[in-house]
Amino acid sequence: MSNQPSHLERFASVVRLRAEHREEYLKLHAEVWPEVCAAITAANISNYSIFLHEDLLIGYYEYLGDDHAVDMATLAADPATQRWWALTDPCQERVVGTPDGEQWAPAPEVWHLHP
Amino acid sequence: MSNQPSHLERFASVVRLRAEHREEYLKLHAEVWPEVCAAITAANISNYSIFLHEDLLIGYYEYLGDDHAVDMATLAADPATQRWWALTDPCQERVVGTPDGEQWAPAPEVWHLHP
């Protein structure tokens, strides 16, 4: 485990929303299960939003932990999260550039406002 | 002018990055002009990042003002911002769903984490 102090990292990623599951996905996200939100928060993730342009879902969140990979693995092992993804993954289609074993493709940050 | 108290709004939007201008765009964003950053901040925008997936630029920012349209118009009238956009707009290609007169297409928020 790192002894470095945590610093905030911003993550964005994308995945396609299948047209035939669009309404289902939006309905699910109108009332995300509290236990799913709790697991996300426990993974040191905050300020998480999902946006939609045409058929492209865009995720944005901020991470303030020591080890993003470990926290993501913990989140992926959470039973409620697994039940949630069993509903949401079929609504999505992975895009070009998505790493093996992942659902969302990373969009690296190219700039951040520093006033 | 509204008498309602300001509340934070999150905005995401997308635009294509032209392959032949990719390096130029990234180089510009490695050192965005201070006066451009100051104009963005003066427009009540904060936590602004630009991400890149393949050839898709994704913008995310938070707005804490009284009138987004008025602040965007003020930003668009800023001379430094106009000089900046004269460099960056040719690097970009507007996508389907971009409103007339705008460069970036809005991606409405479909969900936000409320722990």
Image: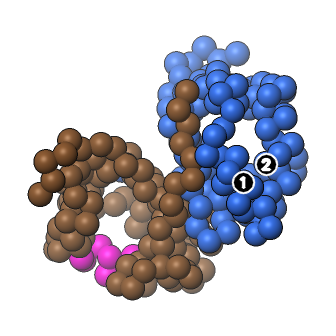
Chain colours: A blue, B brown
Horizontal side of residue A46 vs A97, given as left or right: left
Q: Nearer the viewer, residue B19 or A94?
A: A94
Q: What type of secondary structure mainly makes up the magenta span?
A: helix
Work out whether mark 1 precedes mark 2 in sequence or the reverse, and give the earlier one: 1
Q: Nearer the viewer, residue B19 or B11?
A: B11
> Marks 1/2: CA distance?
7 Å
Residue A58 seen anywhere in this rendered image of the structure: yes
Horizontal side of residue A39 vs B48, given as left or right: right
Residue underneath mark 1: A25
Is B111 placed above or below A67 here? below
The quarter of the picture where residue A96 lies is bottom right
Name the residue: 37% across, 49% down.
B9
Q: Nearer the viewer, residue A101 or B100?
A: B100
Horizontal side of residue B20 vs B99, given as left or right: right
Name the residue: 50% across, 37% down.
A47
Q: Are marks 1 and 2 in contact (CB under 8 Å)?
A: yes
Name the residue: 65% across, 28% down.
A34
Q: Position of residue A69 (x, y in %)?
A: 74, 31
Q: Amino acid at mark 2?
A: Thr
Write the start and end of the magenta stretch as one range: B82-89
Tag shown at residue A88: 2
Residue A106 seen anywhere in this rendered image of the structure: no
